[in-house]
Structure formats: C-alpha cells, structure tokens
Amino acid sequence: MITKNKTNMRLKNILLLAISTFLMACSSISSDGDELIITSRFNSTWNIYEGIVRNDDGSITYHALPWGGLVGAVKEHNMPADWSGYESIRFVFSEPAKVPMQIMVSDKLKTWGKAGITSLTCYFDGQNVTSIDEVALQASDTTVITVKSVYLTPGNAVWESTPIWKGNCAQGNWQNGFVIAPEKFTTAYEGDKLEIIFTTDKSNPDVTFWMMKTIYNGTDSTLQGNDNELNKWGCATMGKEATSYRIVLTAHDVAKLREKGMFINGYYNTITQCNLLRKSFSTSVDK
C-alpha cells in the first residue's frame, strides 16, 4: 500500500510538472531584462476590414484603417489586469511611423504620437490602472505598421513630489490658463518630471475629447519633453478618465523654464495642482 501511494504521488508530481511546463510554454508573456514582452497579446482589430500578419521574427504587420485599432486583450484569468506596479507600455516599430498614431489604454488613458517616430510610450504612473481590459494602437490614416515589440516596463522608481502651483483653473474652451513663474523651476533638473493634476470636464455631452497645451511663457514654443506626443496644434490629448499628465523635462526645457516660466492652457480640463517630481530608485516595483 505504501509503495502504491508513493508511485501515485510520483505520477501526480510528474503530471503537475508537465502541466506547469505546458502553461509556461503557452504563456503570451515573455521577458527582456526587466521589461515584459506582450506582443503576442495583440491578435485582433477593432475594424473587421483591417488585417494582421504575424511574422516569423515575432513582429506584427498591421494594415491599419483610420481610427481602427490593433487590439491586445490583457485580462488575466478572465479578470481585468492590475498594472499599478508598472510605469508604462511601449510600442517599438520596425520603421518610422508614416502617420500620427495613438495608444488607448482601456477608456482610461491615451497618448498621441507624431509621424516619424520609431516608438511610442504611454506612461500610467500616477493613474488608476488597476483595472485594464485591453490596449489598442490606432492610426490616424490608412497605413501599414510593423510592430516589432510591445513592452511593459516595471515601475522601479519612486518620484518625490514638490508642489509648484496650486489652484482651481477650469479651462473650458481654451478660456482660462495660468502662468508658473520662472523661480518655481530653480530646483528642476534634466530628467525630472513635470506633473499636472487635473480632472476632465465631462458635463458637456458635445465634448468628446480633452487637450492640454504647455509652452514657455511669452512664446509659442512647446516643451521638448513631450514633443512626440503633440498633435499638429502643439496639444497633448488627455484620456477621458485621466487625472494626471507627466512630462519628462529635457535640459533645454529646464533652461527655458528657469528663464521664462510656463503657461498652461487647455480644452475642458480643470487643473488643481502642478508638481516637480524627482526620481529615487527603490528595490521594489511597488509604488
């Protein structure tokens, strides 16, 4: 009886090992250093007339139509994914984009990208990303995009916050804006983030998009740090449920902001606070 039980246990362990190995082999997530590769999750489109070709090297050739979408289902065990331990999702393209594109993260976030870029990143630190169903890459016009890889980047940094402006600026239809004085940027350095805390005004049913514009005060020049995310009018597009927008400052941004300060305006946002964020690394991906 004891020998039979041991044999059954050995068979059970072998079976469990085989199942575990099979599940690992079939997993749609792999890693590249600290980043997770989720390219294989993108296997459908929002427009039935669009096309996907999976290439031998693992890349995806996406035949896009205007405002369709290359869609990745990111649920885990049929439940929305919790990405609060991650900093961003990044699409890497085999060739420069021929048309502007955007990343949509469920209905929470969106990031616009100009034509000519070779990668596009949507940062979701500071956002509510505890319940993510799907992500879509959209093109503004008919084009062919080869997506080399899609990465999830862990949030292994803590950002120390220093407030530089507080108020309650309801911007409406570009009606109100405000200035942050140059002296507020004396402690800013290259690589710091400018964080803008806001809510989108959804009271008008005719308003279906929300935008924000950040320029060096007294000029028409937008910041360099988010240049790839701006549309042809120099505006960043906000997600419907977004509550925070962050710009990584370049050395040029810091110099101009110390000299000129910054003017912020927008379309149907209410801004309540702006902060400077300084990076300090932690040993955990938890924020």
Image (cartoon, rainbow, N blue to C red):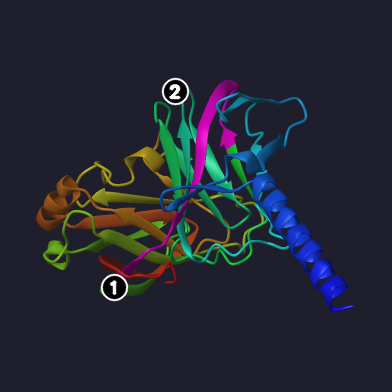
- What percent of the width, then of the height, locates residue 269? 47, 61
Task: Residue 174: tell me if it is visible.
Answer: no
- What percent of the width, then of the height, locates residue 234? 36, 40
Residue 21, numbered circle: none
Magenta range is 138-159
Residue under the point 24% across and 41% down: 221
Task: Residue 99: tell me if it is visible.
Answer: yes
Q: Which quarter of the image is occupied by the N terminus?
A: bottom right
- What percent of the width, then of the height, locates residue 227? 33, 40
Q: In terms of image quadrants, where is residue 186? A: bottom left
Q: Which quarter of the image is occupied by the C terminus?
A: bottom left
Residue 84 vertical position relative to residue 212 in the rendered view, above or below: below
Element carrying mark 1: strand
Instruction: Please name the residue that numbered disc 1 is placed on.
Output: 161
Work out which residue is located at the far right of the displayed protein and give it.
1
Q: Is residue 145 magenta?
A: yes
Does 46 sit left or right of 212 as displayed?
right
Element carrying mark 2: loop
Residue type, numbered disc 1: Ser
- What percent of the width, then of the height, locates residue 210? 51, 52
Residue type, numbered disc 2: Glu
Residue 265 vertical position relative to residue 165 in the rendered view, above or below: above
Instruction: Give the number of the mark in front: 1 or 2.
Output: 2
Q: In terms of image quadrants, where is residue 265? A: bottom left
Crowding at mark 2 (Cα within 10 Å: few <14, some 14-19, many 20+): some
Residue under the point 26% across and 43% down: 224
